[in-house]
Amino acid sequence: MDQLIPIVGTMVLLGSALVGGIFFAFSSFVMKALARVPWAEGIAAMQSINVVVLNPSFLGAFMGTAVLSLVAGGLALTGWAHPSAPYFLGGAIFYLAGTFLVTMLGNVPLNNQLGTVSATDPGARDLWEHYLDRWTVWNHLRTVAAMAAALLYSLGLMQNGSA
């Protein structure tokens, strides 16, 4: 376990911070900007974002951090006597439950729903207003969770003497 902690710990720390930073950008200005443009333009822009985001760099960071968080959590559980174990387990829980699952169960279904409408359909306006509110709440939650995971992973590395 001791040899894997610095490697896995550094990777999950960087991945959580990177993903949290991306989500922070959406919470702090992207969604606010989309809310300011006419609703049809906002829908079209978000639909485009939802297609373009499915690329190797984002998915590698997002999914890779989830996989490595499973590894970090497993290392923590199998090496519970290690002083860094509670921090790595906490980081894994925050990332997997608060970032990954929130995305899959909160944001992705909303994205899929938005993807089914035409931006020019007058009925899409109500969906867009609902989407803006709900999606942004879920995004705030996953942002905080990713940042909390990064903090816990950082503390775990410090406990390990790897930071």
Image (cartoon, rainbow, N blue to C red):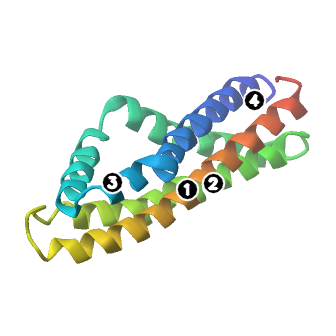
* Residue behind mark 3: 34
* Residue behind mark 1: 142
Q: Using a 10 Å C-alpha cutoff, classify the residue at mark 2 as few (fewer than 14 neighbours), some (14 to 19) or many (20 or more).
A: many
**Of the numbered discs in the image, which one, if any, rests on residue 81?**
none
Q: Quadrant of the C terminus?
A: top right
Mark 4 and mark 2 lie on one chain; the one further toward the N terminus is 4
Q: CA distance from mark 4 to mark 2?
A: 21 Å
Q: CA distance from mark 2 to mark 3?
A: 24 Å
Q: Position of residue 149 (x, y in %)?
A: 68, 46
Nearer to me, 44 or 52: 44
Q: Using a 10 Å C-alpha cutoff, classify the residue at mark 3 as few (fewer than 14 neighbours), some (14 to 19) or many (20 or more).
A: some
Residue at the image point whose x is 25% and y is 56% from the top: 42
* Residue behind mark 4: 5
Answer left or right for 157 relative to 109.
Answer: right
**Of the numbered discs in the image, which one, if any, rests on residue 145?**
2
- Given the image, on which type of amino acid does mark 2 rest? Ala
Mark 4 and mark 3 lie on one chain; the one further toward the N terminus is 4
